Amino acid sequence: MKPWLLLLAVPSVAHAAPPARDFAYGVELAPLSKQAFHRYPLPGSVLRMVTTRELADLCVYDAAGRPEAHALVWPREPAPAISEQPLSVFPLEISRDTAGVEVKIERDPVGQILRTLSQPLVDAKQRAYLLDAHALEGRLTGLNLTLAGAPDNVMLDVRIESSQDLTTFEELTRTTLARLAHDGQSLTRTSVELSTVPAYLRLSFDPGVSAVALEKATGRVERASASAPLEAIELDATPGERDAQAEQEFRYLLPFGPRAARYSVLLPSGTQLVQGTLFGADAEDAPLLALDRQVYRTPPSAYPLVQSRTRVLELRVDDAGGGVRAGAPKLRVEYLAPSLLFAGDGTPPFTLAYGSASARCTPLASDVLELEAPARASVRAVRTLALGGPTRLTKPEQDKSPRVYVLWSALLIAVGVLGVIARRLLRSV
């Protein structure tokens, strides 16, 4: 892509961009080197003053006050790392009629299984295996099973259950393994798709195929790669009234529409534990959708936010246990901070103007400048500027006093009188 093609966008930007004084504040940016395009990671101090979800009240000017073409780009989350990890396999014998089985397990001080002893509760036996997955680092997305003693043509039903404590097991899935051969062709299916974070797995095989044994098991583990750095903002709330369902409601308004990744609930002093539901919406007048339900504690834990582009958050705390006893919890939101990309053909230093209830600048598509802009920050913030001041953050109210209506009425009457006079003068000529 040729840089001069990108500069074709500058005249349209210059024609549409408002003057810098229409924004509340600004940041003076000095280039670290002479480049055609620059990158500036937007700090929280700038984002907190932006009034639009799309970050439209941002504009870049050169030293002469001419606007520069700009775009906004958010960091991309890296793809998770997938690895194959071995699982310890322990044979069991369980009842065919019930899931009851007496299991004695010897473990070392860190929880690693040393050996298992099992005895069925009744005589009808079913072949089963216990897999130790407590040491896996990440989410288990599948199993690869190696079967021993299986004939060339066999289909084997398998039930897979998970447990965190070896006391209770919950069924995850039922599937069929297969090893088929016919006329020089073969079909083998010995893998199972899962999505869980178990400590232990129990595999129960069809009792009709007694010759088949599980020789080896490995797990496909998905582990999050090092994520992009997150910025954080703490939001205050005003406690609302208790509703008919005996809940406390706390509403939080984010100053912009960030791509939120995680949140934490900071409980006030005197409250150690509450249970509640977090709701979210894209706008203040939009319907709230349930995002997460947790037991929130002190010290706080961070929880992922599934709906990332959220402007309004509301925490509804159950009244069970007393709820929030005094004050209101704070909400800490961690989000992916965007970077500002802009053309640097003007005279430095540049000014990033931001924060306005009415002034708008239209950014270019992010992929237009991203290919040409440097990967790291190429400008530094020199100082903060007061442009139009904080009054630019709110729209001026229209004067609706009687004096205004009187003046408009007088003006209309004067226009009417002038019209009558002009008509009479035309008739007398």
Image (tube, helix red, strand yellow):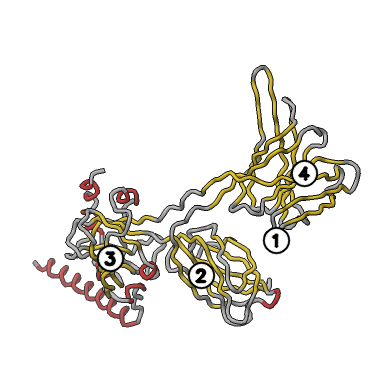
Which callout, 3 or 2, points to the residue nearer the camera? 3
Label 1: few (<14), some (14–19) or many (≥20) C-alpha neighbours in 10 Å: few
Q: Label 3 to label 1, Cα distance in Å?
A: 53 Å
- Quarter where residue 243 is shown: bottom right
Asked whether the beta carbons under mark 4 and mark 3 sit within 8 Å of each other, the answer is no
Which callout, 3 or 1, points to the residue nearer the camera? 1
Residue 322 to residue 182: above or below: below
Circle 1 — which element?
loop
Going from N to C along the chain, the mark reached first, 2 or 4, is: 4
Given the image, on which type of amino acid does mark 4 rest?
A: Pro
Give the residue at mark 2: 332
- Quarter where residue 42 is shown: bottom left
Label 4: few (<14), some (14–19) or many (≥20) C-alpha neighbours in 10 Å: some
Q: Which mark is residue 378?
A: none
Going from N to C along the chain, the mark reached first, 3 or 1, is: 1
Q: Label 3 to label 2, Cα distance in Å?
A: 28 Å
Asked whether the beta carbons under mark 1 and mark 4 sit within 8 Å of each other, the answer is no
Asked whether the beta carbons under mark 2 and mark 4 sit within 8 Å of each other, the answer is no
Asked whether the beta carbons under mark 3 and mark 2 sit within 8 Å of each other, the answer is no
Circle 4 — which element?
strand
7 left or right of 238?
left
Give the residue at mark 1: 109
Asked whether the beta carbons under mark 1 and mark 2 sit within 8 Å of each other, the answer is no
376 or 133: nearer the viewer: 133
